[in-house]
Image (cartoon, rainbow, N blue to C red):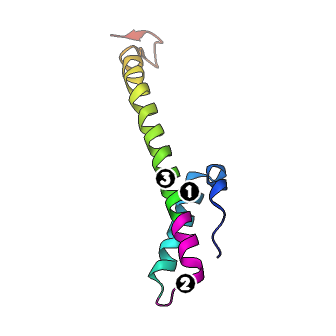
Amino acid sequence: MASKGPGDVSKLSYAEASAELDEIVEFFDAAEIDVDELVARLERASVLVDELDRRLRATRTQVEELAPRLAATADDVVEIDPETGEVIE
């Protein structure tokens, strides 16, 4: 598989970008490396790694922002007795 251009990484899903990076790693692990593709694949791998890292950092930030809200909401959950419909304290 030939490397794709560096500009289209943001359009890939995380799984697609990760799979493409795996393919590039497999290319490097091959016994014979096509020198003509080496630089292009290294550049593409760098772009993929940067994009995946950016998405992981953004997700981590979102989780850190949402976790306290979720914990606060969980503390406010009211349990209801399924038989009587009354609030269990």
Alpha-carbon neighbours of circle 2 within 10 Å: few (<14), some, or many (≥20)? Answer: few
Residue 23 visible here: no
| Towards the viewer: 43 or 25 | 43
The residue carrying mark 1 is: 15
Tell us which disc is closer to us: 2 or 3: 2
User: With 1 as the anchor, is 73 left or right in this view?
Assistant: left
Between the C-alphas of marks 2 and 1, the distance is 27 Å
Dots 3 and 1: beta carbons under 8 Å? Answer: no
- In this rendering, is residue 18 above or below 10? below
Residue plotted at (57% across, 58% down):
17
The residue carrying mark 2 is: 35
| Towards the viewer: 66 or 78 | 66
Quarter in which the N terminus is drawn: bottom right
Specify the amino acid type for callout 2: Val
| Towards the viewer: 43 or 70 | 43
The percent coordinates of residue 11 (x first, y second) are 66, 50
The percent coordinates of residue 47 (x first, y second) are 54, 57
The residue carrying mark 3 is: 50
Tell me the chief SS of the magenta region.
helix
Q: Magenta stretch?
A: 31-44
36 falls in the magenta region: yes
| Towards the viewer: 74 or 43 | 43
Residue 64 visible here: yes
22 falls in the magenta region: no
Dots 2 and 3: beta carbons under 8 Å? Answer: no
Specify the amino acid type for callout 1: Ala
Q: Residue furthest left?
A: 89
Q: Secondary structure at mark 2?
A: helix
The percent coordinates of residue 75 (x first, y second) are 35, 17
- In this rendering, is residue 80 above or below 14? above
Q: Quadrant of residue 66?
A: top left
